[in-house]
Image (cartoon, grey):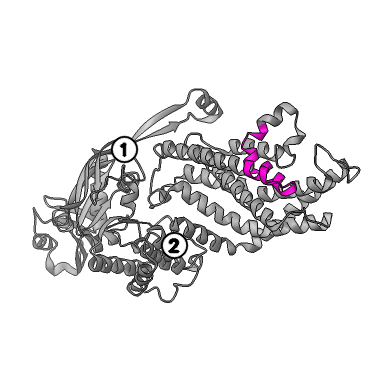
């Protein structure tokens, strides 16, 4: 049974528009004009218990609006949402006891207090008995390795340490679903990796369902088995990460350094991406031509060095975004 | 209730880090009071003279008391913070927590006011003692009653400011509304007691929220009687209820209009 059910969800914003210059400013006082922006256009999806799902899309695609409707912050115009049997519109408070949220761009912790005091605070607002909060803090302190700085005011922590504390604060009340909105934004690669492995461990240990939005392909690739891509308010892809790679990774990039110049031209299944005489970069569509064919065209005896790679997932996703934008 | 006490406690803990900053504002309060003390000294040519029923000493203690309330509440920042939260969409991060937003605002601001009150009450008493060399004749029990009324005044003020701040859901900026409110409160009740206004205005002002937020508790301090105490407390409870309901209504209507674009 799904833990999240979203059906035909829509949200429209009314935004004031003003003509340019002082004349426009005066005009807008007497005759204000508005335009409506359809942020989310009738999207539907389901998430199973314990799943780690990536909900991605370019800026302004409708990701955050969807999350905010799912967590009861915004009211939808149409459609229905059910998160752990609660309707966020009518049961916002009950839902709040069962979900956790981490917004990478927004601090939820009290910066002048220590992480320990913050965790106690979150325990109190979620009505958890003191003894249970202490036990939970101890447990999460070990899991997230907070021992060194649990008594240092949050304002003195590094961004990576702060994000770890943000995640722990959102787990104090043992939520069934955790919404992570760009949790690794601004972090260096080592800390990112650390946060990812902690999220993975948390999902494994507590079976927490994780709904992740991120612009970082590494987060999506390393954490999630399923991906939903949203663009212009509609879902353009809802598939497993495996299928996404299988369908879109049928193109290989062959980067070759040649002994002698080769004169190659585009032909079926082969596209020349770069030709600098001795250095060639070609794209091979493996549904039409094999990589071996491409190498034969280059003449194996003429190759000094060769590198065959997949198209980066980042490029695949941005291609999906672009394709949808063109429509 | 435990959660609101915890929010209050956390805000007190957080603000204790700023104790030096809060103490610096002593200078401003001292200067303000010094100006008023001299102004009233000039008006009262004879210290034993009664003007509109107030002796010089009563008048000075009245001004000190209302000035302490005014400074403890520190309305401008409080209102601007709520207004900014609404406009910038930061309020969204409070909405998805299992507490009432109004309860949260009240608890955090009370926490801030508690730290300021600890300092400003002492400062007010010291200034009064320095200039008048005596305290108003008031028993400990009466002082406790005045303190209760003082706390009610702070709570009602916070709810009023929260209501004004939340009006940002409907208008672009609630700043001008706060400006009008603050000038109204400052002139009617903080600087001048109601008795200084024309007879026709006194009746209206006595039944206005001024009785609850400054005039009522201040007159109790300078001229205490249990009868007045009961009347002031009744008016404070009534206004507390009315303003809380207004605040809740604004929030409930406003939150449906919340526009939070982007991440």
B218 left or right of A66?
A: right
In the rendered image, which quarter is residue B25 located in? bottom right
Image spot of residue A114 (x, y percent):
48, 68
Q: Is residue B228 located in the magenta-colored stretch of the structure? A: yes
Residue visible at 75% across and 39% down in the picture: B192
Region of the chain picked out in magenta, as a range: B205-231
Image spot of residue A39 (x, y percent):
32, 39
Q: Earlier in the sequence, mark 1 or mark 2?
A: 1
Task: Using the image, name the chain to which the residue with label 2 belongs.
Answer: A
Residue visible at 14% across and 62% down in the picture: A298
Q: Which mark is residue A11?
A: 1
Depth check: A22 or A44 in front? A44
Instruction: Classify 10 Å Cα crowding around label 1: few (below 14), some (14-19), many (20 and above).
Output: many
Chief secondary structure of the magenta portion: helix
In the rendered image, which quarter is residue A163 located in? bottom left
A291 left or right of B164?
A: left
Circle 2 SS class: helix
In the rendered image, the residue lying farthest to the bottom is A148
Q: Rounded to the nearest whole Å, what is the CA distance between mark 1 and mark 2? A: 33 Å
| 1 vs 2, front mark | 2
Task: Using the image, name the chain to which the residue with label 1 belongs.
Answer: A
Image spot of residue A136 (x, y percent):
34, 69
């Amino acid at each position: 049974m799904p833990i999240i059910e979203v059906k035909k969800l829509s949200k429209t914003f009314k935004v004031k528009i003003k003509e340019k210059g002082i004349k426009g400013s005066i005009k807008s006082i007497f005759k204000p004009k508005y335009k409506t922006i359809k942020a989310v256009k009738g999207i539907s999806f389901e998430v199973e218990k314990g799943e780690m799902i990536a909900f991605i899309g370019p800026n302004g695609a409708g990701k955050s609006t969807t999350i905010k409707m799912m967590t009861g912050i915004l009211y939808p115009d149409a459609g229905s949402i059910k998160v752990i049997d609660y309707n966020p519109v009518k049961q916002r408070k009950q839902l709040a006891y069962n979900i956790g949220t981490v917004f990478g761009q927004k601090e939820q912790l009290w910066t002048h207090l220590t992480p320990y005091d913050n965790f106690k605070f979150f325990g109190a607002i979620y009505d958890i008995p003191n003894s249970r909060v202490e036990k939970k803090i101890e447990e999460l302190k070990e899991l997230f390795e907070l021992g060194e700085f649990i008594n240092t005011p949050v304002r003195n922590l590094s961004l990576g340490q702060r994000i770890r504390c943000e995640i722990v604060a959102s787990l104090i009340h043992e939520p069934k679903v955790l919404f992570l909105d760009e949790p690794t934004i601004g972090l260096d690669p080592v800390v990112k990796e650390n946060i990812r492995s902690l999220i993975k461990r948390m999902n494994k240990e507590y079976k927490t369902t994780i709904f992740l939005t991120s612009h970082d392909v590494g987060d999506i690739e390393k954490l999630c088995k399923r991906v939903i891509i949203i663009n212009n308010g509609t879902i353009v892809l809802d598939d497993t990460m495996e299928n996404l790679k299988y369908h879109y990774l049928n193109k290989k990039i062959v980067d070759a350094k040649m002994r002698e110049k080769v004169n190659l031209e585009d032909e079926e299944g082969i596209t020349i991406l770069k030709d600098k005489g001795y250095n060639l970069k070609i794209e091979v569509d493996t549904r039409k031509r094999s990589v071996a064919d491409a190498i034969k065209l280059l003449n194996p005896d003429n190759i000094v060095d060769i590198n065959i790679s997949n198209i980066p997932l980042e490029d695949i996703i941005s291609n999906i975004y672009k394709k949808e934008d063109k429509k | 209730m435990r959660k609101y006490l915890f929010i209050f406690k956390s805000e007190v803990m957080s603000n204790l880090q700023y104790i030096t900053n809060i103490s610096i504002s002593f200078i401003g309060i001292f200067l303000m009071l010094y100006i008023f003390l001299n102004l009233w000294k000039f008006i009262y040519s004879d210290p034993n003279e009664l003007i509109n029923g107030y002796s010089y000493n009563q008048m000075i203690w009245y001004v000190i008391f209302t000035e302490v309330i005014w400074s403890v509440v520190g309305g401008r920042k409080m209102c601007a913070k709520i207004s900014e939260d609404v406009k910038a969409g930061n309020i969204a991060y409070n909405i998805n927590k299992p507490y009432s937003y109004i309860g949260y605002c009240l608890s955090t601001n009370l926490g801030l006011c508690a730290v300021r009150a600890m300092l400003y009450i002492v400062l007010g008493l010291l200034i009064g003692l320095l200039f008048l060399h005596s305290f108003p004749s008031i028993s400990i029990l009466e002082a406790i009653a005045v303190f209760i009324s003082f706390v009610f005044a702070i709570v009602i003020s916070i709810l009023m400011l929260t209501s004004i701040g939340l009006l940002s859901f409907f208008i672009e900026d609630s700043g001008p509304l706060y400006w009008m409110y603050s000038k109204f409160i400052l002139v009617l009740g903080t600087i001048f007691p109601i008795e200084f206004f024309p007879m026709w205005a006194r009746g209206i002002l006595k039944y206005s929220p001024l009785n609850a937020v400054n005039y009522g508790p201040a007159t109790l301090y300078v001229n205490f009687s249990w009868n007045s105490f009961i009347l002031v407390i009744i008016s404070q409870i009534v206004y507390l209820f009315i303003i809380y309901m207004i605040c809740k209504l604004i929030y409930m209507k406003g939150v449906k209009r919340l526009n939070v674009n982007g991440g």
